[in-house]
């Protein structure tokens, strides 16, 4: 097997000063692990490039780490911090423009301003899309106030990376079990439900050019496509869908491997979503970059699939040369 040295990784995080996750947001991390993450997040220079070289990653697409600005109550503060994060990210990209790209951080507390900022990021700063960390103060992206946001994504022809954020509520099922919070499970539940809201609201019928990226091997959804179709077909609740949910997901959603280094999950995703819909990612610095790279190099898939997953699909989706 020939080593692939031009991998593209899409869910790779940095942190702008002033937007560091608070201890309450990351309390579920082991303190020693958290310390290493805190040191790595703001560093976008020699140390990160050395790690990328070792892992055979030619391009990282950088994004402001969660929770970002989505949970900031005051719109004016969120707007200011989002623009600050994007300007910081642009400076990092300029350090090594052939190795870094960016997803815009957007304060959807004010949709019109967020759309203007997305245009600035794409047209002036050269960013390749947007990344939203969950709901914005409990508002999900299928709600009508976000219509201009979807129109802007279509006009700019860039994807939205729908990333976990801080859930707006705490279901009773997690009561007494804080170990299920965060990346272990609750973020997956919230993010997969967020995507399903878009599908069942018919959002992709209204915005047929919109494209969404999901991380973490599709937040369990590739595994559930048949059941979604089966149960949606017999429900009497909600709007009539133009096609089965699985078809919308396969047509409008692409996924990354971020945070899931498992052959069985990868093969399931490729079979369920198609070879063109799965892209390599690490979830740096929350996951080990070398472990992720070694895994995808040796995963039990064929070599055509490996090239598509490692680089070709991301180059197409993000229009990277």
Image: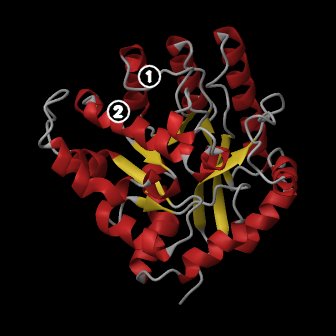
Instruction: State the residue lying farthest toward the front.
Output: 176
Pick the front one: 145 or 260: 260
The label nearer to you, 2 versus 1, is 2
Q: Which residue is mark 1?
A: 149
Look at the numbered disc 1 and give the secondary structure of its residue. Answer: helix
Instruction: Give the colouring mode of the picture.
Output: secondary structure
Q: Nearer the viewer, residue 177 or 16?
A: 177
Which residue is tagged 2? 197
Q: Locate residue 124: give its quadrant.
A: top right
Whole-percent x, y for residue 64 in the image: 69, 38
Residue 63 at what x, y percent from top left?
65, 42
Q: As drawn, is 8 to the left or to the right of 300?
A: right
Up/down of 285 relative to 261, above or below: above
Of the numbered discs in the image, which one, if any, rests on residue 84? none
Category of crowding for the residue at label 1, using alpha-carbon neighbours closer than 10 angstroms: few (below 14), some (14–19), many (at least 20): some
Looking at the image, residue 234 lies above or below residue 75 = below
Badge 2 crowding class, 10 Å Cα cut-off, few under 14, some 14 to 19, many 20 or more, is: some
In this rendering, position of residue 295 left or right of residue 248? right
- Sequence-wise, which precedes: disc 2 or disc 1? 1
Residue 128 visible at all: no
Image location (x, y in percent) of residue 221:
37, 53
Q: How many angstroms separate mark 2 from mark 1 (CA)?
A: 16 Å
Question: Which residue is found at the position 74% from the left and 69% from the top?
Answer: 53
Instruction: Choose top left, top right, bottom left or bottom right for residue 235.
Output: top left
Residue at image coords 64%, 78%:
294
Instruction: Describe residue 259's horizontal placement relative to residue 277 as left or right.
Output: right
């Amino acid at each position: 097997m020939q080593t692939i040295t031009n991998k593209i990784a899409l869910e790779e995080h940095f942190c702008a000063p002033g937007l560091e996750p608070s201890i309450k947001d990351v309390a579920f991390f082991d303190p020693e692990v958290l310390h290493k993450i805190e040191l790595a997040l703001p560093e976008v220079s020699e140390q990160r490039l050395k790690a990328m070289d070792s892992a055979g990653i030619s391009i990282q697409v950088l994004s402001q780490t969660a929770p970002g600005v989505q949970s900031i109550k005051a719109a004016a503060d969120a707007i200011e911090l989002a623009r600050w994060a994007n300007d910081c990210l642009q400076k990092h990209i300029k350090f090594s423009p052939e190795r870094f790209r960016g997803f815009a951080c957007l304060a959807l507390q004010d949709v019109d301003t967020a759309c203007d900022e997305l245009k600035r990021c794409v047209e002036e700063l050269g960013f390749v899309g947007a990344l939203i960390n969950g709901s914005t103060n409990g508002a999900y992206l299928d709600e009508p106030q976000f219509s201009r946001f979807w129109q802007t994504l279509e006009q700019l022809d860039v994807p939205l990376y729908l990333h976990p954020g801080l859930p707006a509520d705490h279901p009773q099922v997690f009561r007494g079990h804080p170990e299920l919070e965060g990346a272990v499970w609750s973020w997956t539940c919230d993010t997969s439900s967020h995507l399903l809201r878009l599908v069942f609201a018919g959002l992709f019928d209204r915005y047929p050019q919109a494209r969404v990226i999901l991380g973490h091997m599709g937040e369990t959804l590739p595994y559930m496509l048949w059941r979604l179709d089966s149960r949606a077909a017999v429900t009497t609740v909600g709007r009539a869908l133009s096609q089965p949910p699985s078809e919308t997901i396969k047509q409008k959603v692409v996924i990354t491997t971020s945070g899931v280094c498992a052959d069985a999950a990868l093969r399931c995703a490729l079979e369920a979503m198609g070879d063109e819909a799965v892209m390599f990612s690490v979830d740096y610095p929350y996951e080990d970059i070398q472990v992720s790279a070694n895994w995808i190099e040796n995963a039990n898939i064929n070599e055509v699939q490996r090239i598509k997953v490692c680089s070709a699909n991301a180059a197409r989706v993000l229009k990277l040369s």
